[in-house]
Image (tube, rainbow, N blue to C red):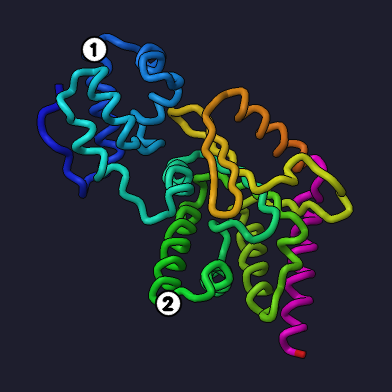
């Protein structure tokens, strides 16, 4: 069984997952069999082993007891669970960083991966009007760090559906939204992302209750993440993921084509840019 603690400076989640695989195989258990003993799915165990999901402290204790690992996972769980994101989003952000494809529906604001610095700052200031500038700066830095995923020219593949409300929520600084929309347009024209706009004329649709993110991986089952105000949940249950995938497919079917969406995004950006000048 594992004896020494993990080095927190060297991808602790990946190392912890690798040790879990070693301990599970030493016990002669499959992922499904270990999942049954811990009352979770086999795919959940697989996501822990690949580092796609964080290991929570209480779950680490159960693993130690089941696999007789002498408290190894409990001792090392803290380093693996450290995150610069809120608890409700941390697991999704970490999975996002490893995803092969990301499909996202944004009902109210530009998705984090596509935000500019000025837009992100305005969003965080709206969330936390009494926060210090240092706090806002840290939040903006972390959000822009997430967006660096798109520095890779091909992976992950990002496909977003933006509700038309996202394009129209200009506030008192239309130039900030204009800049953000031009940034999206540049990413579209460089063929780095796919974007569709769901127009108001589409009426009621399959994802009216909140935002939705679908993620697929090379070596782990797909995940679905739904988010509300100050809360979010990551799903790996195949039936639930299939249900959310259908909802996303229905959104794309009712949205404008990518070509028409780009035309609308650039038109609105020009409109708000002109409004700022006047």
Give the x, y percent position of residue 19.
23, 28
What is the crowding at mark 1: few (fewer than 14 residues within 10 Å), some, or many (at least 20)? Answer: some
Which label number is shown at residue 59? none
The vertical placement of 46 against 115, above or below, is above
Give the x, y percent position of residue 132.
42, 77
Give the x, y percent position of residue 117.
51, 71
Question: In terms of secondary structure, where does tag 1 sit?
Answer: loop
Residue at the (52%, 47%) spot, across then down = 154
Residue 47: quadrant of the picture: top left
Residue at the (70%, 75%) spot, across then down = 171
Total number of numbered discs in the rendering:
2
Residue 62: quadrant of the picture: top left
Image check: 258 left or right of 100? Answer: right
Q: Return the residue at label 1.
A: 27
Residue at the (55%, 25%) spot, across then down = 237
The rendered magenta stretch, by its main secondary structure, is classed as helix
What is the crowding at mark 2: few (fewer than 14 residues within 10 Å), some, or many (at least 20)? Answer: few
* Residue 217 falls inside the magenta stretch: no
Q: Quadrant of the C terminus?
A: bottom right
Q: N-terminal of the two: label 2 or label 1?
A: 1
The span picked out in magenta is: 253-277
Q: Nearer the viewer, residue 257 or 180?
A: 180
The vertical placement of 184 against 32, above or below, is below
Q: Return the residue at label 2.
A: 132
């Amino acid at each position: 069984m594992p004896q020494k603690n993990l080095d927190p400076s060297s991808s602790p989640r990946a190392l912890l997952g690798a040790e879990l695989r070693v301990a599970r195989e030493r016990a002669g258990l499959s992922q499904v069999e270990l999942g049954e003993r811990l009352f979770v799915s086999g795919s959940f165990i697989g996501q822990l082993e690949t580092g796609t999901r964080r290991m929570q402290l209480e779950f680490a204790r159960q693993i130690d007891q089941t696999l007789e690992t002498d408290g190894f996972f409990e001792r090392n769980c803290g380093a693996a669970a450290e995150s610069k994101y809120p608890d409700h989003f941390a697991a999704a952000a970490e999975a996002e960083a490893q995803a092969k494809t990301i499909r996202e529906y944004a009902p109210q604001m530009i998705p984090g991966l596509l935000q500019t610095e000025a837009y992100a700052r305005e969003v965080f200031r709206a969330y936390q009007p009494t926060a210090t500038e240092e706090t806002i700066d840290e939040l903006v830095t972390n959000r822009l760090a997430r967006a660096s995923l798109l520095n890779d020219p091909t992976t992950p593949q990002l496909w977003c559906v933006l509700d038309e409300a996202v394009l129209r929520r200009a506030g008192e600084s239309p130039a900030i939204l204009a800049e953000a929309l031009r940034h999206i347009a540049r990413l579209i024209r460089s063929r780095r992302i796919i974007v569709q706009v769901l127009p108001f004329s589409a009426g009621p649709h399959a994802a009216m209750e909140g935002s939705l993110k679908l993620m697929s991986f090379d070596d782990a089952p797909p995940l679905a993440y739904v988010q509300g105000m100050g809360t979010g949940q990551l799903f790996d249950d195949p039936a639930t993921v299939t249900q959310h995938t259908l909802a996303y497919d229905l959104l794309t079917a009712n949205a404008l084509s990518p070509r028409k969406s780009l035309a609308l995004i650039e038109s609105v950006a020009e409109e708000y840019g002109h409004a700022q000048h006047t």
